[in-house]
Amino acid sequence: MSRYGITLLSGGLDSTTVTTFARSEVDHLSAITFYYGQTHSKEVECAERIAKELDVDHRLLDISFLGEIAWYSALTNPELFPLPKNRTEIGFGVPITYVPLRNTIFLSLAAALLESSILKSIESEGEDPERISASIFMAPNAIDYSGYPDCRPEFYEKAVDTLNEGCKIAAQYNIKFEIHTPIINMSKADIAKLAQKINAPVHLTWSCYEGREVPCRSCDSCVLRAKGYEEAGLIDPLFKNLSK
């Protein structure tokens, strides 16, 4: 069986944990990182270092035009929308850090890249389609999260059906995309424990919405990450790395 996979690697704790997990799940794994006009590129730089550390083929895709389309967000348009800090009710309502349809767009682009690789293996290299599987690994979380609607299991259950209705590998070769979201129902504490268990290079990650020398520790992402490590009883390797 030839197991083809693609993982969406943002450079943060969650996607790094999932990418590390995905390495043992497929034979041919690629990681894709999107530069979409976010407020800083630090997480992109981290993703490049993480992919190198994990020895995973890495694609950096510049889709910075997305910032002009999905402009109603503090992550793509901080001049208009200040980044919320120290929110007391994280996960209730959809915050201004939500980027309109970001995961829908990311998922479609990742699937297109994976399908291209599979079609090449079948139509140019003669691989047997009956021995091929197609897996997309993503790191949404619906437990300790900011409240984004495209991080819920219901979204991915419907999205995979849409992909398979519109792709050649399913229509002609009966190869169905599978979307794997292994941490979607985990707490941040459980994710931190899993990252440690599988030796994910968490010390290279960046979760903060800002691109400073050290994390701000007050944005949603920083607060949730700190909460997870505290509840897990672990020390965040990122801060050990920054203190050196």
Image (cartoon, grey):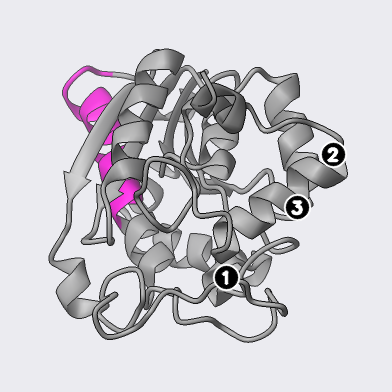
Q: Residues within 10 Å of mark 2 (few under 14, many from 20)?
A: some
Numbered range of the magenta stretch: 109-126
* Position in image of residue 7 (x %, y %): 44, 37
Tell me if 185 is positioned left or right of 214 in this view: right
Asked whether disc 1 touches disc 2, contact meaning CB atoms under 8 Å apart, the reply is no
Mark carried by residue 155 = 1
Callout 3: 10 Å neighbours few (<14), some, many (20+)? Answer: some
Classify mark 3: helix, strand or loop.
Answer: helix
Nearest the viewer among 134 and 170 is: 134
Q: Earlier in the sequence, mark 3 or mark 2?
A: 3
Judged from this view, the residue extending furthest toward the front is 243
Eyeballing the image, is 65 above or below 208? Answer: below
| Residue 20 disc label | none
- Amino acid type of the residue that numbered disc 1 sits on in the rendered structure: Phe
**Residue 197, can we see it?**
yes
Q: Which residue is mark 3?
A: 227
Of marks 1 and 2, which one's residue comes earlier in the chain?
Answer: 1
Left or right of 36, for residue 29: right
Q: Nearer the viewer, mark 3 or mark 1?
A: 3
Residue denoted by label 2: 232
Q: Main secondary structure of the magenta part?
A: helix
Picture layout, residue 28 above or below residue 143: above
The three-letter code of the residue at mark 3 reads: Lys
Q: Is residue 186 magenta?
A: no
Q: x, y (%) of residue 103?
A: 42, 63
**C-alpha gap between disc 3 and disc 1:** 26 Å
